[in-house]
Image (tube, rainbow, N blue to C red):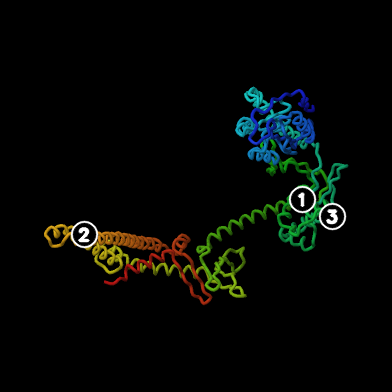
Amino acid sequence: MARKSRRKKIEEVEFEPAIVPKPGQEAGRVGTAAYARLSAEKEDDDSIETQVEMLRQFIGQHPELELLDVYVDNGYSGTNFDRPGFIRLMDDVKSGKIHCIVVKDFSRFGRNFLETGYYLETFLPHMNVRFLSVNDGYDSSRESDRNSIVVPIRNIVNELYAKDISKKNAAYFETASKIGNKRISKETYGYLADKENNVLVADPVSAPCVRIIFRWFLAGYTTGEIAKRLSMLQVPTPFALKAEKEGRPVPESDQWRDDRIRTILQNRTYAGDTVYGKRRKMMYKNIGEHKTAPEEWIIHENTHKALVSRADFEKAQELMEMSGRKVKQDRNARIEQREEFRDYFHKKVKCMECGGIMQYSRYSRNGFDDGFDGAFYICKGKSGSKQCGQRVHEDHLKIVVMDQIRNLAVLLCDRKELSGRMRGGLPDNGKLKKLRRNLSDLKRELSRMAEARESLYENMKDGIIDWDEYQMLKEHYITGERALKCKVADAESKKRETEARINKSLELAEHLEEYLRQDGLDERMAEEFVEQILVSSTGAIEIQFTFADVLEELSEHMEGDE
């Protein structure tokens, strides 16, 4: 039974004028938007043009309303507020352009109870925007309408209606498909749609290509090899044939690919079957079109003439499954192999000649299918007009780096006891001793100057110096004390910094000792200690460590004079 129209005569609906005109709005005139929507579902009330004309007439009959723009969403569900016309309308509301919205009824504005309620009860009142629903006789400027329980009930009914229609459509299609009331699928590569007889027939242009694809695959060719053969023979792709029929240009990038070959090999249409439900959408849940699991498909066998025998099709599926398992196994094996040959010096190996970052490359002596045998770093930059091309084996770099780290560890550990004595304040040579001695001298000088200043007054009382001399010497000592205090503070700061560097060097030595208990270099050690590695075509290798500044500072501490 067709849904009855809820349209009311425009003259039967009365509205009060707007309460408060917006600033800058002509007195008595409110900037108004007409919003119309028609969903993708079949709706027999009216067309989108009829809706718009109805709203224009209504606004024209109310002098206080000034139509500024018409906003239309044709083919959009009311359960989803992500509609271009609606979004543009809300943008104009936020900018202050629109002060009043007129719709045919609440369902045109939206069928989602929560979101529709948010706009009507929160957002639009906050923006001081008037809302008019013609067929519902609703005017937000009337307090009785704003407080009416009828509005939320109507919004709930609208949402339930959207859910009911969507579910009924899906149930009808599924039931009709199961009982054999089938309709032709859209044209598939290899077939043409005979709409008069409601059946698919072989396409003389593309059907031979489908057959040869299955034949090659069953003969042992891979999908990639088949794609190359078709491209070499310049066989039009499915996209190219469709574009040609529709009079559209075909981009140069359109080529046969192995994924297109796999799609053809897995399509049951070529075995004479019709499959429904591969893709579905749920409008009332705002869930767009999506793929479904094979167990959800509705399959009707032998609905049209097959392009390949069922035995060949099933054999192709077995080969595809075996190939998929092998690809997965190979991929897992490659992941394990790549983990074994990991790039410990990622973006840290640089070429001395061109300054470029050398790339990490794994290699295999007997082909990559047998696994990796090693890796090297290669420079793909340019030195002058030629490609640099120099390379260094990863194992060689690891050995050099590990040797350097061991040498540094020995250096640090040999001086660890000496550094400890320095930190503990025992007499020793070096920068820290000088800093401590200098600080002690400054403090003694400061104490001597303070005592001399304090004795000035007694000297004046005893007649040793007069008043003028007293004032002059007092100022001299005060100025000298200030300068010495600054020097003492600076010396103490340097002493603290030096002690911190020594502590850091001791921690570094202990850290290195911990790592050196390991058998070889690992990724964590390379990341923590190596800043960059410079490689020359002459074979020279320069390693810059992250703690180079600590080593330099430590050397300064160790090599001072008495």
Q: Is residue 287 visible?
A: no
Where in the figure is residue 313, as x and y percent of width and height? 76, 51
The kind of secondary structure element at disc 2 is helix
| Residue type of the residue flagged with mark 2 | Gln
Q: Earlier in the sequence, mark 2 or mark 3?
A: 3
Q: Disc 2 and disc 3: Cα gap in Å?
A: 116 Å
Where in the figure is residue 186, as x and y percent of width and height? 80, 45
Residue 63: name its quadrant. Answer: top right
Q: How many marks?
A: 3
Whether residue 115 is situated above or below residue 545 in the rendered picture:
above
Whether residue 414 is situated above or below residue 286 in the rendered picture:
below
The quadrant of the picture occupied by the N terminus is top right
| Residue type of the residue flagged with mark 1 | Ala
Residue 151 vs residue 511: left or right?
A: right
Residue 178: name its quadrant. Answer: top right
Residue 352 vs residue 63: left or right?
A: left
Q: Nearer the viewer, mark 3 or mark 1?
A: 3
The quadrant of the picture occupied by the C terminus is bottom left
Residue of label 2: 471
Dot 3 surroundings within 10 Å: few (below 14), some, or many (20 or more)?
some
The kind of secondary structure element at disc 3 is loop
Q: Disc 2 and disc 1: Cα gap in Å?
A: 119 Å
| Residue type of the residue flagged with mark 3 | Val
Residue of label 3: 205
Q: Earlier in the sequence, mark 2 or mark 1?
A: 1
Q: Nearer the viewer, mark 2 or mark 1?
A: 2
Where in the figure is residue 155, as x and y percent of width and height? 67, 28
